[in-house]
Image (cartoon, helix red, strand yellow):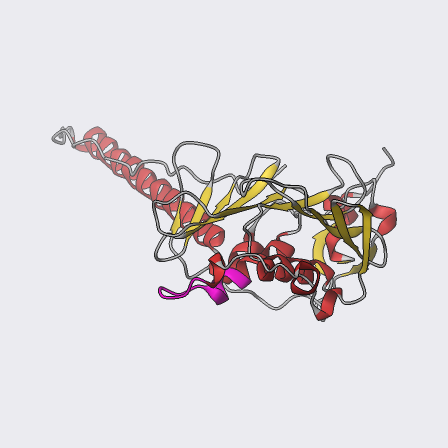
Amino acid sequence: MPYEPDDDHFREYHVTPRHLAGSGGTGDAGFEPVAHWPRHYPDDGPCQLLVTSPDHRIRIGWFGDDYDLWKITAAEDAVSTPRWVATFNQNMPPEIVAGFTRALANGWSEDNDDFLRPTSPHWSESVRSPATSDWTLTTPNRNTVELTAPDELAGLALDRSFSAPTEEPWVLWAGPPGWGTRAEATFTARTPTHLIAATAAALADPAPVVRTRGMINRRIEHLVRLAPVSPETAPAPRAPTPLDVRRTAVSAALQRASQSQGSVCANAARIRTTTAQTGYTAPEQPAAVLPPSPHPSTGRGR
């Protein structure tokens, strides 16, 4: 592997096209549209963060150590079997996942079922948007219909031969084939097409995303354009996401524990000094109870 100075490895760049930028290691951007929704940190299982709509009909799970990094579901009510499932792998930029979660957040309300609306039979029109108007429509075979981006490095495919609502006929992809290079999102048959269209529009958005040089996969580095981030072009500060809030809480708890432990040690030292100088033996002090160590989420993907 060629030598790359550390300062360049960790330097931030604007990456274009965004669909080749990779995940960036966290899911913060994907959670921004639903930052006001309830969040949960499961103690067991692979899901590290679960955000739900207030009525729990929508669930957004983030699996920081899995190949399928995101799993998003919607159901008729909080305890019903999901009507549809959307899955995003570890190479999908969270800025693109945000296109899906933003459409979900905008379409949700206690008395609104738009996020459960059946898929339109006129799929080629319903999944298009101004951002994907220049994508090419092809039919490689009788069962497959594809929309392909002008650079041929991204596309949306529908397999019309599916026979069950739990199958995943929709595939939104970007990048060359390969475990570390292909970003992929799959949607089960009942996923509303306006949500798929919003995701495809986020993928086609020409605005760059910010990554460090080391986050760009070496095998696709020649396919992207990198522009160094300067103070003038740095992104504006964003609102804290659920992951940000969790990290802040963990840091605060660790700091309190450290300060408490330091105070106990200082008191013990003063007692020893007084005893040595006066011969007086201080009464035994009760043991200090330190707060339990928090269990932070790893916040990292593969």
In the rendered image, residue 183, in percent from the top left (x then y), is placed at 71, 45
Magenta stretch: includes residue 153? no
Q: Please indicate whether residue 7 sits to the left or right of residue 58 in the image.
A: right
Can you see residue 293? yes
**Residue 148: quarter of image:** bottom right
Magenta stretch: includes residue 106? yes
Residue located at (11% from left, 30% from top): 283
- Residue 207's place in the image compared with 251, above or below, is below
- Residue 107's place in the image compared with 20, above or below, is below
Q: Please indicate whether residue 295 sits to the left or right of residue 233 in the image.
A: left
Total number of numbered labels?
0
The residue closer to the viewer here, 67 or 8, is: 67
Q: Please indicate whether residue 201 sits to the left or right of residue 100 in the image.
A: right
Can you see residue 206? no
Looking at the rendered image, the quarter that the N terminus falls into is top right
In the rendered image, residue 133, in percent from the top left (x then y), is placed at 77, 67
Q: Please indicate whether residue 279 sits to the left or right of residue 27 in the image.
A: left
**Residue 207: quarter of image:** bottom right
- Residue 136's place in the image compared with 212, above or below, is below
Residue located at (24% from left, 31% from top): 272
In the rendered image, residue 124, in percent from the top left (x then y), is placed at 71, 60
Residue located at (68% from left, 63% from top): 201
Instruction: Write the start and end of the magenta stretch as one range.
Output: 103-113
In the rendered image, residue 258, in percent from the top left (x then y), is placed at 37, 41
Looking at the rendered image, the quarter that the C terminus falls into is top right
